[in-house]
Image (cartoon, rainbow, N blue to C red):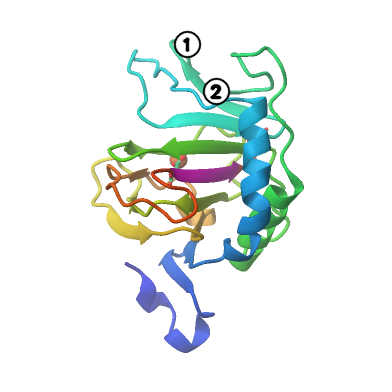
Amino acid sequence: MTLDLFSDAELPRGKEAIGPGAFVLRGFALPFVNDLLPALQEVEQGAAFRHLVTPGGLTMSVAMTNCGRLGWISDRRGYRYAELDPETGRPWPPMPAVFERLAQASAAEAGFEGFEPDACLVNHYEPGTRLSLHQDKDERDYGAPIVSVSLGMPATFLFGGFARSDKAARIPLVHGDVVVWGGPDRLRYHGVLPLEDRPHALLGRRRINLTFRKAG
Ligand code: SIN
Ligand code: FE2
């Protein structure tokens, strides 16, 4: 979309600008994967994936859990961050050190130094699962970027404008890709098209997405 903002020579290999403050970092998570997967299993054991209900009463097709000090939840009362998992009444599992390292390194690679996420929303997709266009706007301040890590089955990420009806770019994401959006792009609408059934060698018929936020 805005690739022409930069000449190819200025762009580090594998870093694609999709806006003035938004980048796809191709394969950036791959060196972390061996440590990410066991850490993810621990998070799942402490806080199981569940399908949340929207304020309007619809059950989301993406299954979600969280780690870190704050977790994003939705129910009939609205969307918000909470310190306790409503399913267990306990704090969310701590953010694994490798999650934090990857989030910080990704943000820095995209030009956002000093990112300190206090929330990681973990999304679990299966074939057919989609995520409709939305803005991430439940965080207290929009100064920090969103860092989004893709693992497992490929997906088509939609990156739109500042109104839901704005045309969205279709960005193919595969295992290991990281998308970072912040600054002037922090409130861009985004979503995920229904997943195709294309099993992944390590994760099978699943796509896991980690979104790191500074929520509180
Ligand atoms: C999200 O917007 O929370 C997730 C995006 C994705 O799964 O790529
Ligand atoms: Fe989002």
Label 2 SS: strand
Residue tagged 1:
77
Instruction: Name the residue nearer the viewer: 177 or 74.
Output: 177
Instruction: Name the residue nearer the viewer: 79 or 124.
Output: 124
53 left or right of 105 in image: left
| Residue at 34% from the left image edge and 45% from the top image edge | 192
Q: Position of residue 111 (x, y in %)?
A: 61, 66
Compared to residue 165, the image places residue 28 above or below, namely: below
Compared to residue 193, the image places residue 15 above or below, namely: below
168 left or right of 146 in image: left
CB under 8 Å between discs 2 and 1: yes
Read off the magenta span: 207-212
102 left or right of 199 in image: right
The amino acid type of the residue labelled 2 equals Arg
Whole-angstrom CA distance, mark 2 to mark 1, is 9 Å
Does residue 136 appear anywhere in the picture? no
Q: Residues within 10 Å of mark 2 (few under 14, many from 20)?
A: some
Residue 131 inside the magenta-drawn segment: no
Number of numbered discs on residues: 2
Instruction: Please tell me whether the stretch drawn in magenta is mainly helix, strand or loop.
Output: strand
Ligand 1 shown in quarter: top left
Residue 209 inside the magenta-drawn segment: yes
Compared to residue 73, the image places residue 134 above or below, namely: below
Q: Position of residue 113 (x, y in %)?
A: 69, 61
The amino acid type of the residue labelled 1 equals Arg
Q: Residues within 10 Å of mark 1 (few under 14, many from 20)?
A: few
